[in-house]
Amino acid sequence: MSLKRSYSLIAPFYDLVLSGALAGVRRRALARLPTQPAQRILINGIGTGLDLPWLPQVHHYVGLDLTRAMLLRARPRDGRLDLALVQGDSLALPFADSSFDHAVLHLILAIVPDPARALAETARILKPGGRVYVMDKFLRRGQWAPMRRALSPLSARIVTKLNVVFEDIAEATPALSVMRDEPLLAGGWFRGIELVKRA
Ligand SMILES: C[S@@+](CC[C@H](N)C(=O)[O-])C[C@H]1O[C@@H](n2cnc3c(N)ncnc32)[C@H](O)[C@@H]1O
């Protein structure tokens, strides 16, 4: 099953499962966004829009997702924000180089088939000095996690990979440098990572 198909099926239940569990983590992660001046920010893989309540109102947002059923759920909550929704692929972003100030990538790098490409694409559309705010589940290099590594080939086909090593993705994306990397949940499996595009 393709990810687009599985997320179309998951869309009606997504908030039920994920809204409570990660609300605190989202709030903490998004509190790091600048609060002024107004900037153009990409929410890459916006899903049903669970990040929206925690976004500062001042900015101009574009929310991108591959799955129409997920995007349709993001729509009703956008009244408070300047938000445009776009159906598209994180692996080939439909935006010009250097056209955003910052990007938020929550629970997307561990999902897409080629996370290094998704991060490189994000770097491409950012202006120099632009920041990438990542929240996701990552293994560390050499980490002993036999269950996650064993289940990953199956879970990757349905909903998410469980074996993505952030350091491998970062190393493949020299345009970005890591500014901050902190554990957020589940003994550091979920991490909040901030990167900046080199000038
Ligand atoms: C786990 S959800 C995360 C949604 C949201 N960022 C959140 O934090 O709740 C993953 C999202 O990635 C989307 N997705 C999967 N592959 C994608 C791709 N290649 N490009 C853009 N979005 C994709 C899915 O449709 C889904 O909405």
Image: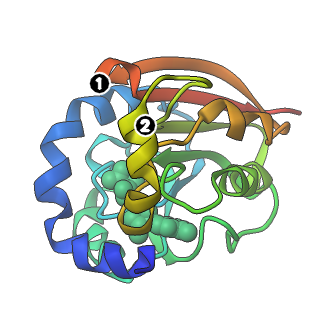
Instruction: Find residue 48 and report its image quarter.
Output: bottom left
Q: CA distance from mark 1 to mark 2?
A: 9 Å
Q: Is residue 94 above or below residue 33?
A: below
Q: Residue at x 53, y 33 (%)?
A: 36
Q: Residue at x 47, y 57 (%)?
A: 153
Mark 2 C-beta to ligand 1 under 8 Å: no
Q: Is residue 15 something that shows in the picture? A: yes
Asked if the residue at tag 2 contacts the one at tag 1, i.e. Cβ–Cβ closer than 8 Å, the answer is: yes
Q: Residue at x 24, y 38 (%)?
A: 22
Helix, strand, or loop for circle 2?
Answer: strand
**Upstream in sequence: badge 1 or badge 2:** 2
* Total labels drawn: 2
Residue 184 drawn at (x, y percent): 36, 22
Q: Is residue 183 above or below residue 11?
A: above
In the picture of the structure, the residue carrying the numbered disc 1 is 186
Q: Quadrant of the C terminus?
A: top right
* Of 151 and 156, the residue lying toward us: 151
Q: Quadrant of the N terminus?
A: bottom left
* Of 143 and 118, the residue lying toward us: 143
In the picture of the structure, the residue carrying the numbered disc 2 is 137
Identify the amino acid type marked 2: Lys
* Of 189 and 59, the residue lying toward us: 189
Instruction: Find residue 82 and report its image quarter.
Output: bottom left
